[in-house]
Amino acid sequence: MKAKFVVAAIAALCISTGALAAGKTYVTAKLATPVAERAQVIANGVVWTCEGDSCTAQFARSVTARVCGELAKEVGQITAIGELSAEDLARCNQRAAAPEATVFARN
């Protein structure tokens, strides 16, 4: 009896995990300059696997210029990513080129 419960629990877990993964898609970013070696990069909370002239990540939502810009800060200029428009791609690369804001503390 206990074995049947364990098998049922494992089957339920597999089905629910598959349902969660079903809502995600893989997105590929094409890089202007290839990375030197295969690496994992975390940008905006997303884990990207980069190799050669591309980086790939799993997404449950569409890619935004902000997400693209955070990746570009890590790996350099991006020439294409998901279904991002040319205008948003330009914003993405501008965001990556912009210097970080400086925060001044008050005394």
Image: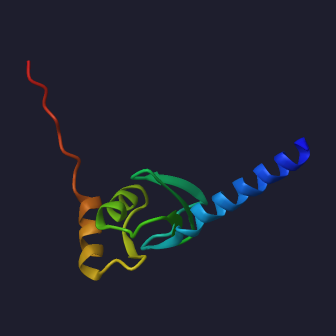
Residue extending furthest toward the front: 1
Residue extending furthest toward the top: 107
Left or right position of 56 against 83: right
Q: Position of residue 49 (x, y in %)?
A: 57, 61
Q: Position of residue 92 (x, y in %)?
A: 29, 67
Left or right position of 52 against 83: right
Which residue is found at the position 65% from the left and 64% from the top? 18
Which residue is found at the position 80% from the left and 53% from the top? 8
Q: Is residue 12 above or below residue 33?
A: above
Q: Split into 4 quadrants, where in the image is the N terminus? A: top right
Q: Is residue 92 above or below residue 74?
A: below
Q: Position of residue 104 (x, y in %)?
A: 13, 31
Q: Is residue 32 above or below residue 17?
A: below
Residue 3 or residue 82, whichever sits in front: 3
Left or right position of 97 against 20: left
User: How many numbered callouts?
Assistant: 0
Q: Split into 4 quadrants, where in the image is the C terminus? A: top left
Identify the image quadrant of residue 76.
bottom left
Identify the image quadrant of residue 20.
bottom right
Which residue is found at the position 30% from the left and 81% from the top? 85
Residue 38 or residue 17, whichever sits in front: 17
Tell me which colouring the rendered structure shows: rainbow
Q: Position of residue 77 (x, y in %)?
A: 36, 68
